[in-house]
Amino acid sequence: MKKTGLLFGSFNPIHMGHLMIAHYIRAFHALEEIWFVVTPQNPTKPLLSLIPGGHRLAMAQLAVAPHPPFRVCDIEFYLPQPAYTIDTLDALRTRYRRRSFVLLIGSDNWLQLPQWKDASRLCARYPIIVYPRFGFALPRRPAPHPHIVFAAAPRLEISSTFIRQALAAGRDVSYFLPPPVADYIEKHNLYTAF
């Protein structure tokens, strides 16, 4: 079984923080691959701030292209919307029987996990690695479930919201983005109004 981490997100846009956390978790938690699961519509976020899914998929593919252990997964574009994490995990498990999937979530999502669809089944069926996010501290005690691991990853204070706001204000955020993503954003004139 190929141990594969799944990093879900709108990736609006994908940035260096996403790649850094994926690299850390793969290196320090013995995962063979990380898949970036691009979400067309997050059930908890408004659609207003999302650019079209085709742009977000294209940028994710450009970002991961130089990193063979990383892949982009578009399965949620073919599932009923909004797609819930448990449904996506089950669909992937059915489609890729030779893989074992590990869910990667930030501490912000960890705190919301009890409100997720079928959260108890998700925790029982799939391992979860929780990485720290600024403003959302991880508990100091061990995780309450044997399938859940709290990663001692570095906290990265980079967010897609920050990047969108900076781009709309005309700021240079090129060092926060993989160069092909920065070029794509400029070429397609994305995020100029937020």
Image (tube, rainbow, N blue to C red):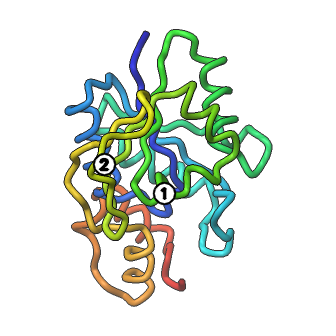
Q: Amino acid at mark 1?
A: Leu
Q: Does residue 143 appear left or right of residue 37 in this picture?
A: left
**Secondary structure beneath disc 2?**
helix
Q: Is the residue marked by circle 2 packed among few (<14), some (14-19), or many (20+) residues within 10 Å?
A: some
- Which corner quadrant of the image does residue 169 belong to? bottom left
The quarter of the picture where the C terminus appears is bottom right
Residue at 44% x, 33% y is 145
Name which residue lies at 26% across and 30% down. 29
Callout 1 crowding tier (Cα within 10 Å): few <14, some 14–19, many ≥20: few
Residue drawn 44% across the image and 60% down it: 108
The residue wearing badge 2 is 19
Res 14 → quadrant: bottom left
* Local SS, label 1: helix
The single residue placed furthest to the bottom in the displayed view is: 169
Q: Is residue 105 above or below residue 11?
A: above
Task: Report the residue that reaches farthest toward the right.
Answer: 80
**Residue 144: where, in percent of width, then height?**
42, 39
- What residue is pinned by disc 1? 111
Three-letter amino acid code of the residue under disc 2: Leu
Residue 20 is left or right of residue 5, and the answer is: left
Are dots 2 and 1 in contact, CB under 8 Å? no
- The residue lying at 49 percent from left, 76 percent from top is 191
Vertical order, 13 against 4 (above or below): below
The answer for how far apart the CA atoms under marks 2 and 1 are is 22 Å
Q: Position of residue 140 (x, y in %)?
A: 27, 51
Tell which of 130 and 50 is nearer to you.
130
Q: Earlier in the sequence, mark 2 or mark 1?
A: 2
- x, y (%) of residue 36? 46, 41
Asked if residue 60 is positioned above or below residue 91 in the image, the reply reads below
The one nearer the camera, 177 or 99, is 99
Residue 70's mark?
Answer: none
